């Protein structure tokens, strides 16, 4: 198993598809960094003063809303018939002068969006790399030849999957480290990095872990679908069909009929959003006017992670089951 893994690891990083993918995500990083560098600026004293004044009034309104919503939730106050409340009285972070400043690039304010962008890039890259890594083996006859020398089907497929996951994990960690360092360097001149507290840096690290795990999930999914179809195009076709027909099709359909999206709980996009952003409220669970709803377990990052992990594990299990049942041709 160790020799198989070492051989597959070398083959993974010796493939042109891997090298091209690494170059593409590096170019994307360079372009985004350059773009944010152009927007880097520092607020003027007048802008800071205005933001401080606005933050005082905005924070007072935020406090009143949170208190009123909490009282309605606990039954101490009665809401107006058409009064709107967010789920679990979540009005977002309390307004601060920095959050009200509309200037250039702020690492403190924009790092979550940067990490969500990295998650999409890495998950798609992992899906393509995983699919091509095993798909080419099947379509070229390399898998059949390998099984003649090493007839342990589960061990062979497992070694290839572990190599793909380890390689994508390494790429994701390095990419995120360079990504974060680059944008910290861009923001170094405006002091928005030093505004972050220890808990916020902890949240950054945990978000990075979720991004890496999502990339690994995408890699395993692409690998397994391509193994089931014995071709790279199978995984790419299934992925494109799912995104365009099921995910995008549902969004278009329910936006046209202008009603609650009943398909949300049966699509992966909401759980993906919950996994990355730590919360997602389904349309069916949103509070009605004059009421305060509690999301509970629905739409949490734990639920998102469980659903995504279950889907990946089922597809991987099917790939291994299919490998054991079929003859190599």
Image: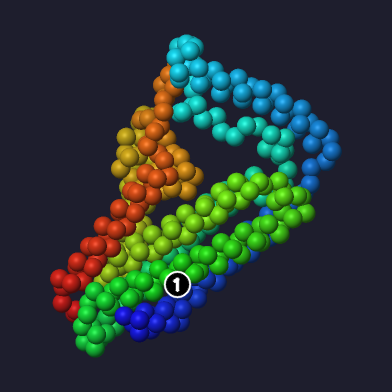
Residue 230 quadrant: bottom left
**242 sits left or right of 192 in the view:** left
Q: What residue is at 57 percent from the left and 50 percent from the top? A: 202
The residue shown at (27%, 80%) is: 143
| Image: 265 above or below 272 | above
Q: Residue furthest front?
A: 198
Quadrant location of the N terminus in the rendered image: bottom left
Coloring scheme used: rainbow
For numbered disc 1, what is the local secondary structure?
helix
Residue 45: x and y in percent read 84, 38
Q: Quadrant of the C terminus?
A: bottom left
- From where the camera sits, is residue 4 visible? yes
Please say whether residue 233 is visible from this viewpoint. no
Residue 216 image point, x, y percent? 41, 62
Is residue 292 found left or right of 187 in the rendered image? left
**Is 30 on the left-hand or right-hand side of 245?**
right
In-front residue for pair 81/206 = 206
| Residue that label 1 marks | 167
Q: Residue at x 48, y 16 (%)?
A: 72
Q: Is residue 116 above or below residue 140?
A: above
Residue 71 image position (x, y, % from top left): 50, 17
Q: Kindly identify the residue that appears in the image at 59 percent across and 34 percent down.
A: 93
**Count of labels shown?**
1
Q: Is residue 234 left or right of residue 69?
A: left
Residue 65, image x, y percentages: 57, 21
Binning the other alpha carbons within 10 Å of mark 1 as few (below 14), some (14 to 19) or many (20 upward) gives many
Q: Which image quadrant for residue 51?
A: top right
Task: Check the image and name the residue furthest to the bottom.
Answer: 149
Name the image quarter holding residue 221.
Answer: bottom left
- Vertical position of residue 201 compared to residue 10: above or below: above
Residue 204 in the image: above or below residue 174: above
């Amino acid at each position: 198993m160790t020799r198989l893994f070492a051989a597959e690891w070398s083959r993974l990083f010796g493939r042109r598809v891997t090298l091209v993918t690494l170059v593409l995500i590096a170019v994307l990083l360079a372009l985004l960094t350059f773009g944010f560098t152009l927007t880097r600026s520092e607020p003027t004293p007048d802008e800071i003063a205005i933001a401080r004044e606005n933050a005082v009034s905005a924070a007072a309104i935020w406090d009143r809303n949170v208190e009123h919503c909490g009282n309605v939730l606990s039954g101490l106050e009665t809401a107006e018939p058409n009064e709107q409340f967010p789920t679990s009285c979540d009005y977002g972070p309390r307004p601060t002068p920095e959050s009200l400043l509309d200037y250039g690039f702020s690492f403190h304010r924009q790092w979550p969006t940067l990490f969500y962008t990295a998650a999409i890039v890495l998950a798609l890259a992992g899906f393509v790399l995983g699919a091509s890594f095993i798909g080419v083996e099947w379509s070229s006859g390399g898998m059949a030849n390998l099984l003649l020398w090493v007839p342990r089907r589960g061990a062979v497929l497992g070694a290839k999957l572990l190599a793909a996951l380890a390689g994508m994990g390494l790429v994701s960690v390095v990419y995120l480290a360079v990504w974060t360092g680059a944008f910290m360097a861009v923001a170094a001149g405006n002091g928005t990095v030093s505004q972050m507290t220890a808990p916020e840096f902890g949240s950054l690290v945990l978000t990075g872990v979720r991004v890496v795990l999502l990339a690994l999930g995408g890699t395993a999914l692409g690998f397994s679908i391509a193994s089931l179809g014995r071709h790279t195009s199978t995984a790419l076709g299934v992925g494109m069909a799912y995104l365009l027909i099921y995910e995008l099709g549902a969004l278009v359909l329910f936006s046209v009929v202008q009603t609650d999206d009943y398909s949300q709980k049966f699509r992966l996009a909401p759980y993906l959003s919950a996994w990355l952003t730590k919360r997602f409220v389904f349309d069916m669970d949103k509070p009605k006017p004059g009421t305060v709803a509690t999301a509970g377990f629905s739409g949490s990052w734990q639920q998102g992670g469980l659903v995504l992990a279950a889907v990946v594990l089922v597809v991987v299990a099917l790939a291994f089951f299919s490998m054991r049942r079929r003859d190599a041709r």
